[in-house]
C-alpha cells in the first residue's frame, strides 16, 4: 500500500508539473502575440518574451563574441553588440551566431556591422547562460567565454538593462538566427508520470497475484 501510494503521488506530482509548464508556455505565447515594444523604458524583465522593434545605431567597438556556442550542431560564437537607441538609452542585442575559424581559434568571424540608423526586430530574453570557465570570472577582449553584464556595463560605460534583445529574422551581416523555440517540456513530465503510474499498477498486480490469487485460488502444486 505504501509503494502504490508513493508511486501514485509521484505520478500526480509529475502531472501537476506538466500542467504548470503548459500554462507557462501559454502565457509566453500570449506575450509574444502582443504588439512589439519600442520604448527603452519597457526593456525590463517584466516584459520578458515580448516582441520588440527598435531603432538605433550599433556601438560596433563594443561588440563581443561568446565562444563555444553552437547552432545547428556547429561550434561558433554568439555575437552581441550594444544598440544605441534613437530615443535615448541602450540595450545589448544578441545579433546572431557566426562560425568559428577552425584553423585559428583567436580569429574573429567576418561579421558586418552597418553604420547609421537601423531597425532591429527581436524579442526580450535573459542574457546568455554561463558556461564553465577555467580562466576565471575576469575576462576582457572581443572573444570571451561568458558575459558578465555588470563588468560589461563598467567596461563600455553604458547603462544597460538586465535583459538582452534576441534579434530575429533572416540571416544577415554574416549571422544566423536559428534560435531554438522555447518548448514547455511538459511531454517529459507526462512520460515520467506514465512510468510512475505503470509502477503503481505493477506493484498492485504483483501483490494481488502473490498474496491473494496464489494463496487462496491456486492448488498447492501450482504455487
Image (cartoon, rainbow, N blue to C red):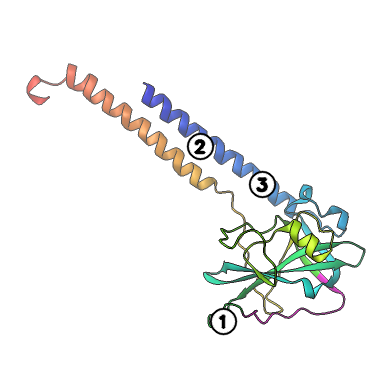
Q: Secondary structure at mark 3?
A: helix
- Residue 101 image offset from top left, x and y in percent: 57, 80
Label 2 vs label 1, nearer the camera: 1
- Residue 181 image offset from top left, x and y in percent: 62, 59
Q: Tell which of 206 and 6 is nearer to you.
A: 6
The structure residue drawn at horizontal position 80% and vertical position 55%, both measured from the top left corner, is: 161
Can you say whether 89 is above or below 200 in the image? below
Q: Upstream in the sequence, badge 3 or badge 1? A: 3
Label 3 vs label 1, nearer the camera: 1
Residue corresponding to mark 1: 104
In magenta, the rendered stretch is 107-119
Residue corresponding to mark 3: 26
Callout 3 environment at 10 Å: few (<14), some (14 to 19), or many (20+)?
few
Cα–Cα gap, marks 3 and 1: 44 Å
Residue 155, by quadrant, is: bottom right
Q: Tell which of 88 and 136 is nearer to you.
A: 136
Cα–Cα gap, marks 2 and 1: 47 Å
Tell me if residue 48 is in the magenta stretch: no
Can you say whether 59 is above or below 203 in the image? below
Query: Furthest residue to the left?
Result: 221
Callout 1 environment at 10 Å: few (<14), some (14 to 19), or many (20+)?
few
Residue corresponding to mark 2: 14
The structure residue drawn at horizontal position 62% and vertical position 55%, both measured from the top left corner, is: 182
Query: Furthest residue to the right?
Result: 87
Q: Tell which of 179 and 104 is nearer to you.
A: 104
Q: Is residue 56 left or right of residue 123?
A: right
Q: Is residue 197 left or right of residue 78?
A: left
Q: Upstream in the sequence, badge 2 or badge 1? A: 2
Q: Secondary structure at mark 2?
A: helix
Cα–Cα gap, marks 3 and 2: 18 Å
Amino acid at each position: 500500500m505504501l509503494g502504490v501510494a508513493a508511486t501514485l503521488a509521484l505520478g500526480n506530482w509529475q502531472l501537476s508539473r506538466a500542467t504548470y509548464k503548459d500554462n507557462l508556455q501559454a502565457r509566453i505565447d500570449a506575450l509574444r502575440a502582443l504588439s512589439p515594444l519600442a520604448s527603452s523604458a519597457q526593456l525590463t524583465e517584466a516584459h520578458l518574451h515580448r516582441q520588440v522593434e527598435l531603432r538605433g545605431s550599433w556601438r560596433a567597438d563594443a561588440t563581443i563574441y561568446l565562444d563555444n556556442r553552437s547552432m545547428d550542431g556547429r561550434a561558433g560564437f554568439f555575437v552581441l553588440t550594444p544598440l544605441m537607441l534613437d530615443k535615448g538609452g541602450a540595450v545589448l542585442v544578441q545579433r546572431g551566431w557566426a562560425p568559428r575559424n577552425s584553423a585559428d581559434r583567436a580569429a574573429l568571424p567576418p561579421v558586418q556591422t552597418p553604420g547609421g540608423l537601423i531597425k532591429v526586430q527581436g524579442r526580450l530574453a535573459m542574457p546568455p547562460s554561463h558556461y564553465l570557465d577555467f580562466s576565471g570570472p575576469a575576462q576582457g577582449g572581443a572573444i570571451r567565454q561568458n558575459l558578465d553584464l555588470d563588468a560589461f556595463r563598467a567596461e563600455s560605460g553604458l547603462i544597460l538593462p538586465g535583459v538582452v534583445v534576441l534579434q530575429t529574422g533572416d540571416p544577415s551581416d554574416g549571422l544566423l538566427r536559428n534560435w531554438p523555440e522555447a518548448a514547455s517540456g511538459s511531454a517529459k513530465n507526462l512520460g515520467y508520470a506514465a512510468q510512475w503510474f505503470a509502477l503503481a499498477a505493477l506493484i498492485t498486480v504483483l501483490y494481488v497475484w502473490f498474496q491473494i490469487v496464489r494463496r487462496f485460488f491456486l492448488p498447492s502444486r501450482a504455487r
